[in-house]
Amino acid sequence: MIKRPQNITRRLALAGASIAIVLGGAISPAWADRAAEDYIQGILDEAFVALNVENEDEKLDALAELVDKYVDERRVAIFTLGQYARRITDEQKEEFIPLFKKYATIVYQDALSNYSGEHLVVTGSVDRSERDIIVNSKVANARPGDQWAEIVVHWRVYRNRDGSMNVLDAGAENIWLALEQRSQFTSVIANNGGGQKGMDALIKQLRDQVGA
C-alpha cells in the first residue's frame, strides 16, 4: 500500500538513507549557485504567503498552484518508476502521469503545511554539475532548542538547456521525497508481478489514493 507522509520531517528522519545514495554518489566540493538560490528563495517567499492563508481550502489550492508551477512532475513521475520506466506502455504512462501529479501535489501540500507560520530562507547551495544543483534552506530565526533549529530542507534544482529551472525533489535529514516514492512504487510493481501487470496495480493504488 502506498503511504502518504503525515509529518515529513519525522518520516524522512526515520527513513535513514544518505544523501549520497539519493543523488547517485558522494558529493565532491563544488561552487555555490546564486541563480538557483534566488530561484528557490522566490518559491519559498511565495510559499510563505500561501501558508499564511487562513482558509484551509484556499491554502491548499495556493500550494497546489506552486507545485504545478515549479515542480517538474512529469520528469519526477518517470524517475519514481525506477527500472520499470522503460517497460510500461504508452497507455499506462498516459494514465500514470496525471495520477502521479495529483499524488505528488498532496505530498507537497502535506510537507509544506508543516511549516505554516514559518519562513524558510536559503542558506547556501552546491552545484553537482552545471544543471544539477542542491539548494539548502532553514527556518528563519529558529532559536536553539526549537523543533526547526537543526532542520535543513534541501531542494534539488534542474537547470534546463534554455536556462530555466525546475524543482525535481525536496528533502530533509538527507531523505528525499522522490526517492521515497520510487521505493514505494517499485515495491508495489514488483510485488504484483512486475512489468505491465505490476504497473496496472500501481495505477489502481494511486487512483484509490487520490480518489480519481
Image: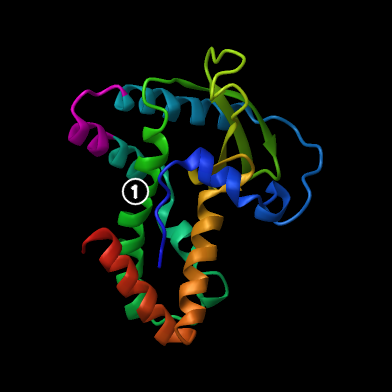
40 left or right of 102 in image = right
Q: Is residue 97 above or below residue 87?
A: above
Name the image quarter holding the N terminus: bottom left
Where does label 1 land, which residue?
105
89 left or right of 175 in image = left
Q: Would you say the magenta stretch is mainly helix, strand or loop?
A: helix
Which of 180/65 is in front? 180
* Residue 31 screen position, x and y as percent: 74, 32
Q: Report whether residue 106 is seen.
A: yes
User: Where is residue 56, by image quadrant?
Assistant: top left
Q: Is residue 90 above or below residue 47?
A: below
The residue at 34%/48% (across/down) is 105
The residue at 68%/47% (across/down) is 19
Q: What stretch is highlighted in magenta?
A: 52-62
Q: Specify few, some or many for label 1: CA neighbours under 10 Å numbering under 14, 14-19, or 20 or more.
A: many
* Residue 162 screen position, x and y as percent: 51, 45
Which of 148/206 is in front? 148
Find out whether residue 147 is within the magenta segment.
no
* Residue 119 screen position, x and y as percent: 45, 20
The residue at 55%/19% (across/down) is 146
Q: In this view, does 64 lie above or below 117?
A: below
75 left or right of 151 in image = left
The colour style of the image is: rainbow
* Residue 159 screen position, x and y as percent: 56, 44
Q: What residue type is labelled 1?
A: Thr
Dot 1 lies on which element? helix
Q: Report whether residue 163 is seen.
A: no
